[in-house]
Amino acid sequence: MALSEAIVNQAKEEARDFLEYSIYVLCTFLEVDIETVTSAIEIPVAEGDPDYYNYVSLKRQLSAFEALTS
């Protein structure tokens, strides 16, 4: 069963919406500028820091969002 183009486009739109919100929340929590952040962001904390994996998640979500919007 192949997915129709309309279903694929709807899924992409829903993914973009989710990622936009999630990126906004993480940026707010981490005090990162939402207007300038990209997936190339340098993680400013050491791996042992409690926020390290929040930054990793932010980078991954930004990469996924960039892939969906390019």
Image: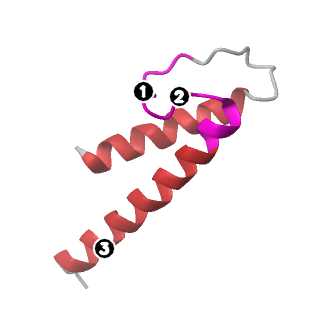
Q: Residues within 10 Å of mark 1 (few under 14, many from 20)?
A: few
Write down the residue under mark 2: 33
Which label number is shown at residue 36?
1
Q: Which mark is first along the chain, 2 or 3? A: 3
Amino acid tagged 3 = Gln
Q: Is residue 30 left or right of residue 7?
A: right
Report the span colored magenta: 26-42
| CA distance separating discs 3 and 2 | 29 Å
Q: Secondary structure at mark 3?
A: helix
Are circles 3 and 2 on residues that touch, CB within 8 Å? no
CB atoms at circles 2 and 1 under 8 Å apart?
A: yes
Alpha-carbon distance for marks 2 and 1? 6 Å
Magenta-drawn stretch, dominant element (helix, strand or loop): loop
Q: Position of residue 7 (x, y in %)?
A: 27, 78
Of tags 1 and 3, the one toward the viewer is 1
Residue 33 at x, y percent in the picture? 53, 28
Q: Is residue 70 among the parts visible in the rendering?
A: yes
| Magenta-span inclusion, residue 11 | no
Separation of disc 1 and disc 3 at Cα?
27 Å
Furthest toward the bottom, the residue is: 1
Rendered view: 5 above or below 17? below
The reply to whether residue 3 is in sight is: no
Q: How crowded is the residue under tag 3: few (<14 C-alpha within 10 Å), some, or many (20+)?
A: few
Drawn side of residue 66 relative to residue 15, left or right = left
| Residue with the mark numbered 3 | 10
Q: Give the residue type that dot 1 points to.
A: Thr
Secondary structure state at the residue bearing disc 1: loop
Q: Quadrant of the C terminus?
A: top left
Amino acid found under the numbered disc labelled 2 = Asp
**Mark 2 packing: few (<14 Cα in 10 Å), some, or many (20+)?**
few
